[in-house]
Image: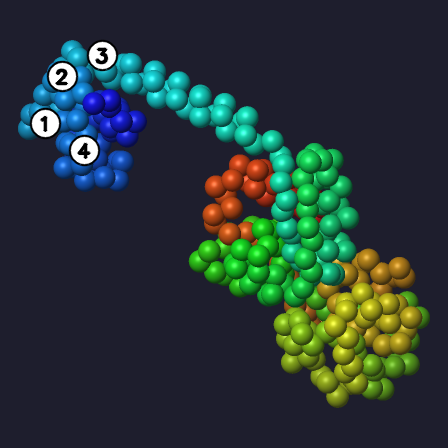
Amino acid sequence: MRPSFDDLSYFEEVANTQNLSRAAQRLGITQPSMSAAIKRLEQSFNTQLVIRSRNGVQLTRSGAALAEHSRKFMADWEQLQANVIRAGTDMLGTFSIGCHPSVALYTLPHLLPALKSKYPNLKLNLVHDLSRKITEQVVGCEIDFGLVINPIRHPDLVIHKLFLDEVTLWRGPTFDSVQNANERVILYCDPNLKQSQALLKAINLNQFQVEHSNNLEVIACLVAKGIGVGILPQRVANKSMEPLHRYEHNDAMVTDELCLIHRFDIQNSTVSHNLKQEIKAVLREQSD
């Protein structure tokens, strides 16, 4: 009977600790399982490998020889494993990235050129929706990676924090804050966003006539033309063709956190792991 890889790794731990109980504990197995592994090895080599005593175990000459050779075998195996994995991890394949359309506009123009330059053989499919729906699709294995705002924690998710943003009221360069201070001002917002809902509860709505749009870029455009003010993330406001300014008659603000999310099991793929690391590096560099 040939020795198994696990039995050799168990024996190596016994040789290191000189104690069956401690070796079993460190490997997370029971002592009977450890003893059975040693017995199988002794049967395989037809010789005694350890001498048991009250204080632990001692290696026989045969056991010491096996320990020396098994260490070299384990090192050679790890190198072989690394070579095989390296040969099979060319950055190929198709992956999906999901994010809100507004998040896409200030992240993907930086991210995709970097990914395409480093990994030209990757195919990336893009999905756009509300952050909470992107999160649901990542959990449901419909999307590989999500760039989402304030993700809800889930036991299957890994969440990597990237950078912060601020959501508040913005006005355009031609909007006369003094002239409109005592009038009901049009306030544009996306009612589907929790940030908008939070700010609407925090401000004095008697000052505003609230009107809805589910597109933040449209809101930014209307605000830039001086039609009213709008609830926008700072990074969206900064992408406006015309400069936007914070609305002077408001102090309310909500902090957003952009995160990269994926399922725990995606870490088992080296390609996925490398792609995750590159996404984190590019977007964190953008935030600096």
What amino acid is at disc 2?
Answer: Asn
Label 2 or label 4, whichever comes before in sequence order: 4
Measuring 58% from the left and 51% from the top, which residue is drawn there? 144
- Mark 2 vs mark 4, CA separation in Å: 18 Å
Residue underneath mark 2 = 46
**Sequence-first tag of 4 and 1:** 4
Q: Name the residue beneath numbered marker 3.
A: 65
Marks 3 and 1, Cα distance to the nearest angstrom?
22 Å
- Amino acid type of the residue that numbered disc 1 sits on in the rendered structure: Asn
Disc 2 and disc 1: Cα gap in Å?
Answer: 25 Å
Local packing at callout 2 (Cα closer than 10 Å; few below 14, some 14-19, many 20+) is: few
Any mark on residue 34, and which? Answer: 4
Callouts 2 and 4 close, C-beta under 8 Å: no
Label 2 close to label 1 by CB (< 8 Å): no
Q: Is residue 261 left or right of residue 125?
A: left
Q: CA distance from mark 3 to mark 2?
A: 14 Å
For badge 3, the amino acid type reads Ala
Amino acid at dot 4: Met
